[in-house]
Amino acid sequence: METSKRVLIVEDDAHIADLLRMHLHDEGYAVTHAADGDVGVRELERGSWDALILDLMLPGVDGLEICRRARAMTRYTPIIITSARSSEIHRILGLELGADDYLAKPFSVLELVARVRALLRRTDALARSARLESGQLELGNLVIDPMAREVLLNRKPIDLTPREFDLLYFFARHPDRVFSRLDLLNQVWGYQHDGYEHTVNTHINRLRMKLEVNPAEPCRILTVWGRGYKLAVTDAEKATP
């Protein structure tokens, strides 16, 4: 089951907080609101957040101090600062403390939601790149080690042929992208010839037998009718550290 991204809003304006919570909830995010800086610090330290929307001017601990504390934590949390302080100095202070983005009040709620979405996509992409550079891909319960050419599913080794491994690893490096059978022949097998598509079908079926709970109703390696195949990856899996 896909886990919702968790967003913490630290904002003392109840009207703004309600609007943000409503729109972010509609986008599928799990949202928690802290109405002052003291509660914001407690919530920040209590949970692992995927994004933090932070006002600068708050009762109690101010937004800059919360930003400073967030950046002192081991887990990296993307931060968007919102504030009526629209002067350049406060924007620079927030960004120098480690905020990823800044919106001055009044702002468009839809624009802020779009920025949250873009920021999380960028964070996910960076996490995937870091995993690739380290030589190992982790997609939820699936772990692929290209150096050892080993695959673990639910921490148990899966016996794959060399071509099955190459096909799975190619899919894992391009999650949720659709590839035609000819694309896969060219990228994985190294040639592109009409009439060989049955080879791709056979290997897809073998991977499904080894990876899917129910190969007849796959949820990992999906057929996109009229286009090809893709490896389905949830948001939570993309962000796996």
Image (tube, rainbow, N blue to C red):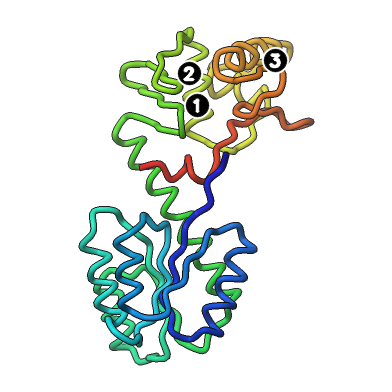
Image spot of residue 138 (x, y percent): 40, 32
Asked if residue 158 lies left or right of residue 61, the reply is right
Mark toward the start of the polypeptide (1 vs 3): 1
Image spot of residue 197 (x, y percent): 70, 15
Q: Observer-nearest residue: 126 or 10?
A: 10
Image spot of residue 80 (x, y percent): 41, 71
Residue identified by numbered label 2: 166
Which SS class for mark 3? helix
The Cα–Cα distance between marks 1 and 3, rounded to whole angstroms, is 17 Å
Residue identified by numbered label 1: 170
The Cα–Cα distance between marks 3 and 2, rounded to whole angstroms, is 16 Å
- Alpha-carbon neighbours of circle 3 within 10 Å: few (<14), some, or many (≥20)? some
Give the residue type at disc 3.
Glu
Mark toward the start of the polypeptide (3 vs 2): 2
Count the marks. Answer: 3
Q: Which mark is residue 197?
A: 3
In the rendered image, the vertical position of residue 122 relative to residue 180, given as above or below: below
For residue 212, which quarter of the picture?
Answer: top right
The answer to whether the residues at label 1 and label 2 have Cβ atoms under 8 Å apart is yes
Nearer the observer: mark 1 or 3; the answer is 1
> Residue at the location (39% across, 58% down)?
49
Quadrant of the image for the C terminus?
Answer: top left
Give the residue type at disc 1.
Phe
Which SS class for mark 1? helix
In the rendered image, the vertical position of residue 233 relative to residue 87, given as above or below: above
Give the residue type at disc 2.
Asp
Q: Observer-nearest residue: 105 or 182?
A: 105
> Residue at the location (39% across, 31% down)?
137
Quadrant of the image for the N terminus?
Answer: top right
- Alpha-carbon neighbours of circle 1 within 10 Å: few (<14), some, or many (≥20)? some
Residue at the far left in the pictured view: 72
The answer to whether the residues at label 1 and label 3 have Cβ atoms under 8 Å apart is no
